[in-house]
Amino acid sequence: AVGSLGSACPALAATNLLANPGFESGSGGGSLSGWSAFGNAYAEGTSTGVATHAGDGVGKMFGNFWGVGAFNVSGLYQQFPTAPGNAYQLHVYSRQNAGDDLTGGTADNWVVEKLTFFDASNTEIGGAAVEARVMDVTFPMDIWVDNPTITAVAPAGATSVGAYLLFLQPNLAGGAVLVDDASLVQIVPEPASIGLVGTGIGLLACRRRRAR
């Protein structure tokens, strides 16, 4: 909505909350340090010949092959304390390589970036999550994809926010996806008192400041 442009402009010096966002080891081996992983989710490094977006490591995910119709998920995530009203943005680069891509078999695997929130009992709060597809059979091969940034706001009752990268396998299709240089930032709205909200000038001002 035009009326929300001023409050949507984030602080310019946002800090990446993620530990080890590039899956780096410093020795070419890749590392999941700072990340929690489940299913088939690993780190891989340049020592194996993998093409990274930057640095010496990437995250790698693929399906669990539980059987036809046995929907399963592999993933990487980090979780942080939060409070209702806090807003976050999540972004990640992704890649599929020819020969290990998502085009084989039934070609129905996909990967998402997801922001979600949990209450004090660590139960996911329904209806609050935001996600976007960052890889499937329609994406190009052998290049790093700069995916859209997603934004989500912590709802009432939220005590933690989770940044998730998920590989979804509904059947037995193969292929693997690489992820790298993820970022999770908390948006700090600029004061609405600038008087530009509702005119569209507020958004232009944000862009000009970023370009300096």
Image: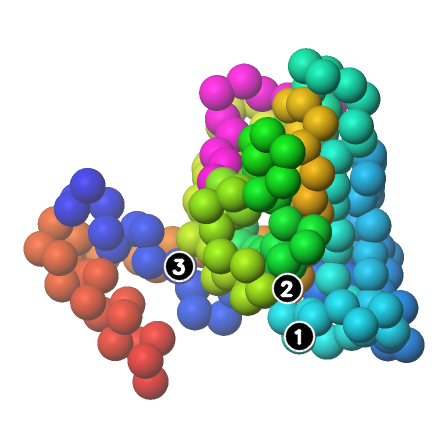
Task: For marks 1 and 3, give the CA distance.
Answer: 25 Å
Q: Is residue 58 above or below residue 28?
A: above
> Is 116 positioned to the left or the right of 26 in the image?
left
Q: Is residue 125 above or below residue 111?
A: above
Q: Amino acid at mark 3?
A: Pro
Q: Which residue is mark 3?
A: 10
Report x, y in % for residue 78: 73, 45
Report x, y in % for residue 124: 64, 22
Q: Amino acid at mark 1?
A: Ala
Local SS, label 1: loop
- Mark 1 vs mark 3, foreground winner is 1
**First along the sequence among labels 1 and 3:** 3
Q: Which residue is mark 2?
A: 181
Image quarter of the C terminus: bottom left
Quadrant of residue 211 within the rendered picture = bottom left
**What residue is shown at x 87% (from left), y 74% (from top)?**
47
